[in-house]
Every structure is written in C-alpha cells, then in structure tokens.
Image: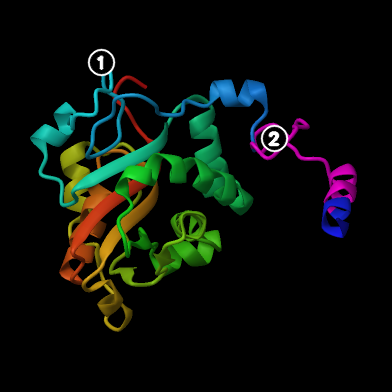
Amino acid sequence: MAGRVMQSVVGLLYPAQCVSCDARIDGDHALCGPCWRETPFITGLVCDLCGVPLPGEDLGTIEHCDDCLAIARPWSRGRAAMLYRDNGRRLVLALKHGDRPDLARPAARWMAAAAAPLMQPGTLVVPVPVHWSRLLKRRYSQSALLARELARITGHDWLPDGLLRARKTPMLDGLNRDQRFATLDEAVRPHPKRGVRLSGRPVLVVDDVMTSGATLSTTADAARAAGATSVRVMALARVAKDT
C-alpha cells in the first residue's frame, strides 16, 4: 500500500514524458501516440537473418532477403526492432550522439519483443565493442547499454567485455558494402582473458544499427572464434534499401 502511494506521489511530481518529444504520457509506453505512429517498428514477415521486412504474409516459414541470400552471414538468425528512418532514426541518433543513454531502457523493451525468437536457454548477450578511443570521446557505448538492458529484461546473462575492438576503424558513412566489409575485417577479437566466457554458450550480439552487416559480421566471427556454440544478432534499427 505504501509503495503504491509513493508511486502515485512520484507520478504527480514527475509525470511520465515521451522519450522522443517530452509530451506527457499515461503509462509506461515511452512514446506518445503521435511519436509511436511515426516510429517504424518492424512487424509481419521479416528476413530470418537480418530482420528486414519482406513483402507477403507471415505464414511461419523461414524467409531470407536478397542481401542475405547473396552474402554468407556468420550468424544463424537475426532481428531488428525498427527501421532506421523517421522517428526510428531520430531515436537512434539521440542515443548514439545526443547524450541520451536513458533511451537504452525503452529501446531494449522494443528489442526484447523482436528478439523473442532468437533467445535460447543459456544465451549470453554481448555488445558490439567500441574502440577505447571512441569510448573515451563518447563516454558510453550505446551497444553495451542496449545489451545490458536487453539481458536484464529477458533474464539472460550479459558480458560487456568478452570481445574487444582490436583496432580503430574510420567512420563507415559513404562506403559501399564491399568497402565496409574490407574496413572491418578482423577489427573485433575475443578478449585475451574474458573471451573464454563465450566458450560453450549461445551468444546474442547486440548493436544499435545494422546497415550492410559488416560490423555484426566481424563481431560474430570473433564470438565464434571464442567458442560460442551459436551466434545470433539483434539490432535496434535496420537500414532498408527503400528508406
């Protein structure tokens, strides 16, 4: 009883706000109605490897997009919570560059719903690692925050430092698919001490955005090199060709 009263008092003093536009909202949905409608959450039939939406009805069969049919993916399944456009893009950029680490918690709730088919017993959730120099500049890793919250919500273990960024790579903006894969080749490796904790575990690799899949590929390769029994991937947002 006292706890409910305290929650009511807190709600009156600090009413819930939309994480996107700061409008007052009821409940804990994180987004107001207009922002929710502007956020392109992915539903329906999707590619089972990268999570991009596909035309047609979801009949429960496994389907793959053209990119995943053309590229050998070093992971077995993948999903994304939203498309990287409209309010989806604004939310990702706010988390990544806008000093909004608070967005990780609601974002992880959206990711948890999409990640349900990927979770296996004993799954270890690991983030795509950030090079130390970039982490020093940004002060936090958005992928690590998402991985931590996703693990907490789904009740799985997480490991923030089982993999490391072996070398600093340039920004990938403007590079084509082949250039992205070449730039990131072997950029991620198992941590020399803590990487052993991936051995014998199914691993879910978490990142904020999937574009070509180059970053997730080098990270999945590193997880497999560390002895993961299987690797699946989860992104907050997916870049689609028609966006």
Residue 2 in the image, given as x and y percentages of width and height: 88, 58
Gap between marks 1 and 2 measured at Cα: 33 Å
Q: Quadrant of the N terminus?
A: bottom right
> Please, is residue 171 above or below residue 167 in the view?
above
In this view, the residue in front, 140 or 111, is 111
Quadrant housing residue 54: top left
Stretch of the chain drawn in magenta: 7-29
Q: Secondary structure at mark 2?
A: loop
Q: Is residue 17 magenta?
A: yes
Q: Residue at x 24, y 23 (%)?
A: 59
Q: Which residue is mark 2?
A: 18
Q: Residue furthest top?
A: 56
Foreground: 201 or 22?
201
* Circles 1 and 2: CB atoms closer than 8 Å: no
The reply to whether the magenta stretch includes residue 125 is no
Question: Callout 2: 10 Å neighbours few (<14), some, many (20+)?
Answer: some
Amino acid type of the residue that numbered disc 1 sits on in the rendered structure: Gly
Tell me if mark 1 has few (under 14), some (14-19) or many (20+) residues whose alpha carbon lies within 10 angstroms of its own: few
Q: Is most of the magenta stretch helix, strand or loop? A: loop
Q: Secondary structure at mark 1?
A: loop
Q: Residue 210, how many percent across, how many down?
A: 33, 41
Q: Is residue 119 above or below residue 130?
A: above
The residue where tag 1 is placed is: 56
Q: Position of residue 221 (x, y in %)?
A: 18, 60
Is residue 64 left or right of 50 when viewed as pictured? Answer: left
Say which label, 1 or 2, has the lower sequence index: 2
Would residue 26 be found to the left or right of residue 160 on screen? right
